[in-house]
Image (tube, rainbow, N blue to C red):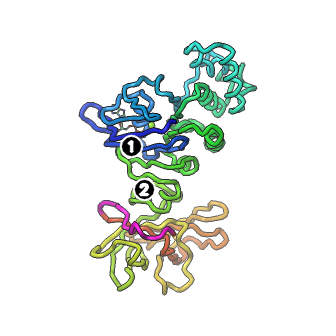
Amino acid sequence: MSAISCHNIIKRYGDTQVVHPFDLDVADNEFVVFLGPSGCGKSTILRMLAGLEDISGGDLLIGGQRVNDLPPQERGIAMVFQNYALYPHMSVRDNIAFGLKRLKVPKPEIDLRIKEVSDTLGLERYLQRKPTELSGGQQQRVAIARAMIKTPKVFLFDEPLSNLDAKLRNHMRIEIAKLHQSLKTTTVYVTHDQHEAMTLADRIVLLRDGRIEQVGSPREIYERPCSAFVAGFIGTPPMNLVEMSVRDVGGHFELAGAGGTVHVDARRFALAGRERVTLGVRPAHLRVDTEGGRGGGFFGEMQLIEYLGNEVLVSFGPGQDKEVDEIAALMPSAQCPRVRDRVGFVADPAQVHLFDIDTGASLLRSDAALH
Ligand SMILES: Nc1ncnc2c1ncn2[C@@H]1O[C@H](COP(=O)(O)OP(=O)(O)O)[C@@H](O)[C@H]1O
Ligand SMILES: [Mg+2]
């Protein structure tokens, strides 16, 4: 049993509160990712779980036991950091064995564990080398091996891939996913990279200014962002977020702004009495208008075309009028217009999001069907 329960956990540095009451249950074997911009409190919470930071208030339970006051080595956790800080003068084998030697584990058992761990991580061939004779990805694998060898109940990762180049990051991300599939150890993984979060997590905890903004599966967070902040944070290219005026035309609402109009179903959104909203629509959910504007849509002059291969990311808008937002859309490269062409795009009404203009809270009704 190695579930983690956080009840109203807070963190203060002097008079400054950096983590506000934090409530979260991580199930046994679950892979949870803390995601959010730099400074939102991800590392602070992780370090409280690890026992490297005092908890200013609330209760932390690991495997049903309250561990607030237990030192790190008694919590059954192992942590992997961005700066993996291997001992440069020691061989890979000694780096991996270090923690167990310190615990006076008998040598035959250490040898056996090293064999298991280095097999799992593909490090058998490197055990005699020094860390400087390894690539960045191999060094990070040694850091993971060093954590794994303690057979922890819980793995904590703090941006473990941030120091690697893009290609290695992809590779190591897949390795970490496979490792979790085979070991199933309860894992909390911190990152500011939404791609890592989306691909690794069973559930994402999206943090903002020391508070949970939303918790959900990657799919829930992508499809039903609870706020404009989440909507703008998740998804590449980012969602278009534009201010629109609202007009009730009976049975549906007509939204107008940013050089276009959208009709939305009155049953999906809580719009009664609102004059303005923030509309969110992902570039992938806009398609080229083929009805001469009769079904509504966004119209303007092509401003920028970014070639992505199979697709292009285009930005269009009214040109001179800088007050009006440009809109981004993804479209097949084969249909790509030219800069300065007049273009029109229609938003898929089942894929639009609406948010309160001031608070950013989603206006989607809780009973509205998932698209
Ligand atoms: N030792 C400290 N003293 C005071 N403030 C700190 C300390 N460590 C972190 N903070 C503040 O706590 C907030 C959260 O930091 P952190 O958890 O490191 O963010 P993240 O990991 O999400 O980038 C930040 O505003 C940071 O400045
Ligand atoms: Mg951090």
- Horizontal relation, residue 136 to residue 157: left or right: right
- Horizontal relation, residue 169 to residue 252: left or right: right
Q: Residue at x 42, y 42 (%)?
A: 38
Measured as percent of width and height from the top left, residue 290 is found at 57, 83
Q: Earlier in the sequence, mark 2 or mark 1?
A: 1
Measured as percent of width and height from the top left, residue 140 is found at 61, 31
Measured as percent of width and height from the top left, residue 183 is found at 63, 37
Q: Residue at x 41, y 71 (%)?
A: 320
The amino acid type, in three-letter code, at marker 1 is Cys
Q: Residue at x 50, y 39 (%)?
A: 188
Of 51 and 37, nearer the camera is 51
- The answer to whether residue 167 shows anywhere in this view is no
Image quadrant of ligand 2 equals top left
- The answer to whether residue 140 shows anywhere in this view is yes
Of 87 and 227, nearer the camera is 227
Q: Are marks 2 and 1 in contact (CB under 8 Å)?
A: no
Q: Is residue 279 found inside the magenta-colored segment of the image?
A: no
Query: Helix, strand, or loop for circle 2?
Result: helix
The amino acid type, in three-letter code, at marker 2 is Val
Q: Note whether ligand 1 is within 8 Å of mark 1.
A: yes
Q: Tell me which corner region of the image, top left, top right, bottom left or bottom right, holds residue 55.
A: top left
Identify whether 138 is placed above or below 258. Answer: above
CA distance separating discs 2 and 1? 13 Å
Measured as percent of width and height from the top left, residue 218 is found at 52, 54
Magenta segment: 358-370
Of 322 and 260, nearer the camera is 260
**Category of crowding for the residue at label 2, using alpha-carbon neighbours closer than 10 angstroms: few (below 14), some (14–19), many (at least 20):** many
Q: Which mark is residue 230?
A: 2
Q: Residue at x 59, y 72 (%)?
A: 338
Which residue was labeled with disc 1? 40
Q: Tell me which corner region of the image, top left, top right, bottom left or bottom right, holds residue 254.
A: bottom left
